[in-house]
Image (cartoon, rainbow, N blue to C red):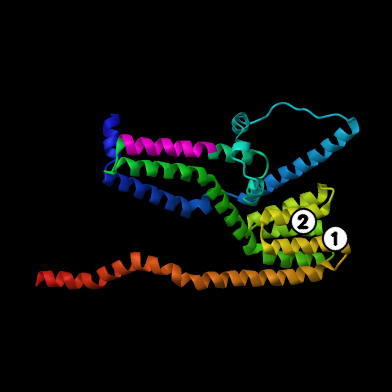
């Protein structure tokens, strides 16, 4: 039974059929994803509420600790990933000094994602090494010499090591793009709220509620900033955290303007108006840059996919007529 399955899976026609099935399945999931995803805004706002409760709990624990003059101890609630990482000391062996900031920029907060990342960086190379080794040396060697098969196995192992970092970078980039598409409009709303006499916390909360339909990530960040403004001892730290989580020059400029307004009492409305204009210009410049690069990016797809079909459509009837003659 195993031999028959191995022969079936190693047949090129069956491999192409499976690949086509997975591609069609992924296309269907991608197209129907927005309709089946549900209300993601409620989930993100719930996570922000959990973060607010966490800040409140830490504040209360700090006050209790100061009052008691002792230490707070609780039960062991470590997850499996954390136990494996701590037992193998992976945080030291696979140390990445910028990991926490990368996870935060990708929308993954807390200690849990840190241990999951180190666990994935340990397991992924081992899994890809074992699978590629078993496939190339036991199931189908594709007529390749041993040295080439070993090179492919080592390449898959390296891919497994770097795969978690690549996934994390892509997630952070998609989140940053989603935030920056809606950030200029959010600044306009924030300017209106501030000039109407609202406090900066109430303005952030109002803008987060309004901008959630266009960018869930930006609504989450603004709500989290509101919670930090309420519970952090230094309000400047809340603005700096917002700039660090988004990692974009436009948001960093706005955070700097807010810090200066808090420290020196400068007019906040004028600063927000200038920053909104600058962010709109940045968004327009980014769109123009992508439009200018589009012809060069379309060259290869045009040659590979469009021109052969065009030749078949144009020359097909002529070839058929010539054969009939």
In this rendering, the answer to whether 238 lies above or below 317 is above
Q: Residue at x 82, y 49 (%)?
A: 230
From the viewer's side, name the closer residue of 69 and 57.
Answer: 69
Kindly check if marks 1 and 2 are in contact, taking CB atoms under 8 A apart as contact.
Answer: yes
Label 1: few (<14), some (14–19) or many (≥20) C-alpha neighbours in 10 Å: some
What residue would you read off at disc 1?
A: 262
How far from the left and from the top, in percent, is residue 157?
45, 41
Label 2: few (<14), some (14–19) or many (≥20) C-alpha neighbours in 10 Å: many
Which SS class for mark 2?
helix
Q: Magenta segment: does it hold 130?
A: yes
How far from the left and from the top, in percent, is residue 21?
36, 48
Residue occupying the far front of the picture: 147
In this rendering, the answer to whether 177 lies above or below 89 is below
Q: Can residue 223 be seen at all in this image of the molecule?
A: yes
How far from the left and from the top, in percent, is residue 66?
88, 35
Q: Which residues are magenta?
A: 122-138
> Does residue 137 appear to the left or right of 37 in the view shown?
left
Which SS class for mark 1?
helix
What residue would you read off at disc 2?
A: 239
Q: Residue at x 51, y 43 (%)?
A: 161
Q: Quadrant of residue 260?
A: bottom right
Circle on res. 294: none
């Amino acid at each position: 039974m195993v031999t028959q399955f191995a022969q079936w899976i190693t047949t090129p026609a069956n491999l192409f059929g499976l690949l086509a099935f997975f591609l069609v399945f992924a296309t269907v999931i991608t197209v129907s994803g927005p309709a089946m995803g549900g209300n993601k805004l409620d989930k993100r706002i719930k996570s922000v509420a959990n973060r607010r409760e966490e800040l409140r709990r830490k504040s209360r624990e700090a006050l209790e600790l100061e009052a008691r003059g002792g230490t707070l101890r609780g039960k062991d609630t470590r997850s499996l990933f954390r136990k494996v990482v701590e037992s193998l000391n992976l945080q030291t062996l696979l140390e990445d000094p910028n990991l926490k900031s990368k996870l935060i920029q990708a929308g993954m907060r807390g200690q849990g994602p840190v241990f999951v990342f180190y666990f994935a960086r340990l397991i992924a190379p081992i899994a890809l090494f074992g699978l590629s080794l078993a496939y190339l040396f036991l199931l189908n060697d594709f007529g390749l010499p041993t040295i080439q098969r070993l090179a492919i196995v080592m390449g898959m192992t390296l891919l497994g090591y770097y795969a978690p970092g690549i996934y994390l970078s892509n997630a952070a980039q998609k989140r940053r793009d989603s935030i920056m598409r809606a950030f200029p409009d959010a600044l306009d709303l924030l300017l209106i709220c501030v000039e109407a006499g609202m406090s900066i916390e109430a303005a952030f909360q109002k803008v987060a509620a309004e901008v959630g339909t266009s960018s869930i990530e930006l609504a989450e960040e603004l709500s989290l900033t509101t919670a930090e403004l309420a519970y952090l001892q230094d309000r400047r730290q809340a603005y700096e955290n917002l700039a660090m989580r988004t990692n974009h020059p436009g948001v960093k400029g706005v955070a700097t303007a807010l810090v200066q307004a808090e420290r020196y009492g400068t007019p906040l409305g004028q600063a927000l108006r200038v920053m909104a204009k600058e962010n709109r210009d940045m968004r327009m410049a980014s769109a123009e840059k992508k439009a200018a690069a589009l012809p060069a990016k379309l060259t290869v797809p045009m040659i590979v996919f469009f021109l052969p079909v065009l030749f078949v459509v144009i020359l097909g009837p002529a070839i058929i007529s010539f054969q009939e003659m």
